[in-house]
Image: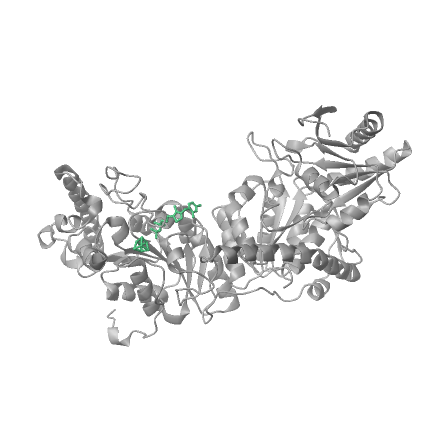
Amino acid sequence: MAINIRALPRKEYLCRGNAACPGCPETLGLRYVGMALGDKAVLVVPAGCSSVIQGIGPKNGFAIPTLNIVFAAAAATASGLARAFQRRGVDAQVVVWAGDGGTADIGFQALSGAAERGENIIYICVDNEAYMNTGIQRSGLTPYGAWTTTSHRGKKGHKKPMPEIMVAHRIPYVATASIGYPWDFIAKLRKAAKIKGFKYIHLHAPCPVGWRFDPSLTIKIARLAVETGMWILYEYENGKLKLNPPSDRLLDPSKRKPIEEYIKLQGRFKHLTEKDIEELKKYVEQNWANIRAMLEAQEKQQLSS
Amino acid sequence: MPRMVLTGNHAVSYAVKLARVQVIAIYPITPQTAIVEKLDEMIESGEFDADIIHVESEHSALAAAYGAAVGGARVFTATSSHGLLYMYEVLWWVAASRMPMVMVVVTRAIGPPWNIHTDHHDIMSMRDSGWLLAMAENNQEALDLTLLAYRVSEDPRVYLPVAVGLDGFILSHTAEPVDVPEQSIVDRFLPERRQPYTIEPGTDVSMGNIFSDEYFEELRMDMQKSMLEALNVIREAGREYGRLTGRSYEKLVDCYKCEDADYLFIGIGSWMGDAKIAAEKLREEGLKFGVARLRWIRPFPVDELLEAASGKKLLVVMDRSISMGHTGPLYADVSGATGSRVPVYGVVAGIGGVDVSYKDFVSIGKWAVERLEEEGVTHLPLTWYHNGVFNYMYPVKL
Ligand SMILES: Cc1ncc(C[n+]2csc(CCOP(=O)(O)OP(=O)(O)O)c2C)c(N)n1
Ligand code: SF4
């Protein structure tokens, strides 16, 4: 689905003077959510940076009706909200806007339950790869080797494969996205809004504060994550996986930029040894191998049917 | 008005249907489970039009009920014991959001060791959370209080959630004749849902972002004000319910022979029925006992309590839970309210479902009067009555 930037709504769904840090990826992402879904969206936000970014009440920096909720309960709260709208005949799109901690760790049970029940919501995990709101602690989505205040010598384990876990729930739509590719994200949101049932979008969101880079580099780093193959843009719809540009050109490793280009700009990786970088590369290769295997299996299936 | 033989749990299910609840979110736990099973059956058979969310935990049950309430639906959930504790942070969130809703707590002990029988530790853990708390004495009350709860919760002078407690097994699984009001009567009693706000497209309402500390404190002060208002709203609604059904709930304190009594048992829940039988027996032996049963724990009906306690020689507060390291929570509430006006003894008993019969209440009554008359002790904050033995478990005698 092509997105015509000129045709996007002019209305700003994120107000100026909100409380985000300079270069914040969550505010970028939220602007796109507003552009994509417009006035039908209602947000459910669990604890995290986005609860703070709204600023000090009684005003609110989000120009989208927003229901804040305790850290673990976003998917459950959104389920109830969506059911009430359905009963009352209110035409709304309930959207969860949750961090990586609120998604992969403390909120995981509620998320898995809502997905299994097939609740009619769009769940967006805005993944800045750590608990930023509490001051940069490791999460289940912090990558291998990254420094946080609770992984001083670099995290030992890898990132949980959250999108794949959601694919395994066999929900109608799973997509990855990046704040560096707004048109891709907006197209995916619009597609998700047309599908009934549980939709999961995993938005990669480099955070200058937590990743230790200059706030002017947010977009550049988001794009490097994709260009180096560290983050892969794809969608999974009706049981079918599809790579999206530019990741669709990166199956061949020689087309990808070296991951060092991505790593070297971030303070959180500055202590990495050669061995650590090798470990990260292995992980990236494994991710691509999984994608390739799925695509090949799909192709075979298509040929035989 | 049809009279049916119903367990406490099923009495609640009928009340939920009569209240025209729209969204139910619920998770099984003994002894509450029969409520949701019955509701599910009613929905499946087409006799009740509601949406039920079979969530994966109690944390999600309350969160989903809350989401649906914020979205404008009349909602219901129910739980017990560990389920209630699992909901704990959401309880506070719901109350401070000022979101009307009703939950039923079928009281049960908290482990370890695992124990499914009644005591009041679960519901008493809600006292500070901003929920209104009522406690049924019998199955009729379980039904009536659930209906009353919706009316009070959705009254703009209150706009706070309400929990209705009933004793696990003693009420939840015991069948009694219950008058089930006609739908038309309930419809007259219970207006369309009202709530302070909904969050939906086309509004610019948001809920729960950060405010200044001063404003935050004012919000909490406003909750306390509404709790005070609730005393009158409950009376008004209780009177109206009485007019429509013949069963008045105007009183937050159900007084049994309080007027001419010298001594009062004070407590909550089904065992106050045993206390009433004991009061009769004790009267036969010349000890004029009465029973002041608190139908509502929050708001604490201090005005009615003081009136009932006035001129009495002794109040014996019966707690089915304890605030470890201090006293029973009801004792603390009652003695705090009465001050030095009247002697108060606190007795804890029946923890983990240990049976306390009217005979036990007779022994407790006699023991209390003896202590008062022979030893002249005016305040005994905590005596733990267990297997017929009175264990004094407080550092001083007052
Ligand atoms: C039950 C509970 N535990 C802990 C917290 C403290 N807490 C608030 S936000 C947060 C981390 C949020 O991290 P993430 O979900 O990744 O979102 P981000 O802040 O990075 O946007 C934590 C631990 C809380 N609010 N509630
Ligand atoms: S810490 Fe990162 S995600 Fe959080 S507000 Fe600041 S820039 Fe945004």
Q: Is residue A117 visible?
A: no
| Number of numbered markers | 0
In-image side of B301 versus B103 (left or right)? right
Q: With respect to residue A252, does B200 lie above or below? A: below
* Rendered location of residue A277, percent (x, y): 15, 42
Quarter in which the C terminus of chain B is drawn: top right
* Rendered location of residue B310, percent (x, y): 82, 44
* Rendered location of residue B264, percent (x, y): 81, 39
In-image side of A236 versus B374 (left or right)? left
Which of the 4 image quarters holds residue B151?
A: bottom right
Give the residue drawn at x 56%, y 29%.
Answer: B113
Which of the 4 image quarters holds residue B22?
A: bottom right
- Type of colouring: one colour
* Rendered location of residue A192, percent (x, y): 34, 63
**In the image shown, does B366 or A54 lie closer to the viewer?**
A54
In-image side of A99 versus A57 (left or right)? left
Q: Is residue B265 visible?
A: yes
Give the residue drawn at x 27%, y 49%.
Answer: A210
Residue furthest left as drawn: A254
**In the image shown, does A9 or B169 lie closer to the viewer?**
A9
Quarter in which the N terminus of chain B is drawn: bottom right
